[in-house]
């Protein structure tokens, strides 16, 4: 039952990355951290203090950072690039495509301050297209963890994973409710079992899906909430198994509904078991400056909108 999920604290997901890369670096001397003038924002201070010789400050030159990272892999290093999600993808897409993805370089592209919850910095920094950009690159693994624990676990996991990875996380303090041990790249994480509706969510919206699921359960609706932390490779088997039970679904993501998690779920359903699907995400729009929770509400990415989407999907069965 969703009511049994316990919040064990509150912490930003970017801190999970900072703690994860430090722990990973202690285990593997080949791990190198690079940043584009945002070491503090990406929580790299602990890494820099302990491993100053394995840190490269690239300055505000993100394209150059990606090229350096690609080159480091040739010598057996495992580079982790760090900057805001907007600058990790949109600004440097050509470099990622040509120098990293095309040749399958073992670069970990670690992107903070993703989505609307970046908040007051506004539309120019709130990228809502990055999941789509990155999942379309052949061979690119795309991971969007739900909380601090899962971000730390994902950071440790990708250090041992061979191949290019896009790891997306955020700025705000958020509830901690997962266990690190439950994270496996490419394996969806069921948070509840249900028969009336499936809710597939990633990132910050996983907790909102849990909140929505609790409300729906109080209304007598049986809800299956699944944390789709890995967008690519997608856990197709878990999706099919769930929608065959519930026969309708909701997708929830802090991203444009065009090209994100929702599209991946819909493609899977269309190929294997067509069902009614409702999308919770931004609808072909840029963001704006504002407080994170207020922006989620305004753009329809909050608990109430997930509840409404679930009820609509059920009605369409």
Image: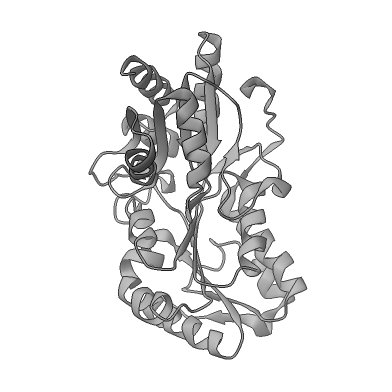
Q: Residue at x 56, y 81 (%)?
A: 56
- For residue 102, what is the image quadrant? bottom left
Colour scheme in the image?
one colour
- Closer to us: 14 or 303: 303
- Closer to us: 135 or 167: 135
The single residue placed furthest to the bottom in the displayed view is 75
Q: Quadrant of the C terminus?
A: top left
The single residue placed furthest to the top in the displayed view is 219
Tell me: 204 left or right of 276. Answer: right
Residue 38 image offset from top left, x and y in percent: 50, 67
- Closer to us: 222 or 243: 243
- For residue 313, what is the image quadrant? top left
Residue 297 image offset from top left, x and y in percent: 37, 29
Tell me: 125 left or right of 79. Answer: left
The single residue placed furthest to the left in the displayed view is 284
The single residue placed furthest to the right in the displayed view is 27
Q: Residue at x 65, y 21 (%)?
A: 1
182 to 32, vertically: above or below = above
Q: Residue at x 49, y 43 (%)?
A: 202
- For residue 185, what is the image quadrant? bottom right
76 to 93, vertically: above or below = below
Q: Residue at x 41, y 29 (%)?
A: 249
**Do we see residue 203 in this rendering?**
no
Number of marks: 0
**Do we see residue 287 in this rendering?**
yes
- Closer to us: 254 or 243: 243
Residue 285 image offset from top left, x and y in percent: 23, 44
């Amino acid at each position: 039952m969703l009511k049994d999920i316990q919040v064990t604290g509150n912490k930003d997901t970017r801190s999970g990355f900072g703690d994860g890369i430090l722990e990973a670096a202690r285990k593997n001397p080949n791990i190198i951290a690079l940043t584009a003038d945002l070491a503090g924002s990406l929580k790299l201070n602990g890494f820099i203090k302990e491993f100053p010789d394995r840190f490269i400050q690239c300055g505000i030159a993100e394209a150059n950072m990606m090229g350096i990272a690609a080159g480091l892999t040739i010598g057996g290093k495992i580079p982790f690039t760090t900057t805001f999600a907007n600058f990790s993808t949109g600004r440097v897409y050509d470099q990622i495509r040509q120098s990293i993805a095309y040749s399958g370089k073992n670069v970990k592209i670690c992107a903070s301050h993703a989505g609307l919850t970046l908040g007051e910095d506004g539309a120019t920094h709130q990228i809502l297209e990055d999941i789509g950009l990155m999942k379309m690159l052949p061979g690119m693994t795309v991971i969007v963890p739900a909380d601090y624990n899962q971000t730390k676990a994902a950071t440790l996991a990708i250090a041992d994973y061979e191949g290019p990875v896009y790891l997306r996380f955020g700025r705000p303090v958020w509830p901690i409710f997962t266990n690190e041990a439950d994270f496996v790249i490419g394996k969806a994480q069921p948070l509840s079992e249900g028969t009336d509706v499936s809710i597939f969510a990633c990132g910050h919206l996983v907790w909102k899906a849990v909140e929505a699921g609790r409300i729906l359960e109080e209304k007598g609706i049986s809800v299956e909430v699944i944390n789709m932390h890995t967008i690519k490779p997608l856990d197709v088997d878990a999706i099919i198994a769930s929608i065959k039970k519930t026969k309708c679904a909701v997708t929830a993501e802090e991203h444009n509904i065009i090209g994100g998690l929702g599209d991946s779920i819909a493609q899977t359903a269309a190929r294997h078991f067509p069902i009614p699907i409702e999308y919770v995400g931004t609808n072909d729009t840029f963001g704006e400056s504002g407080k994170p929770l207020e922006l989620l509400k305004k753009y329809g990415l909050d608990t109430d909108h997930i509840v409404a989407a679930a009820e609509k999907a059920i009605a369409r069965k």
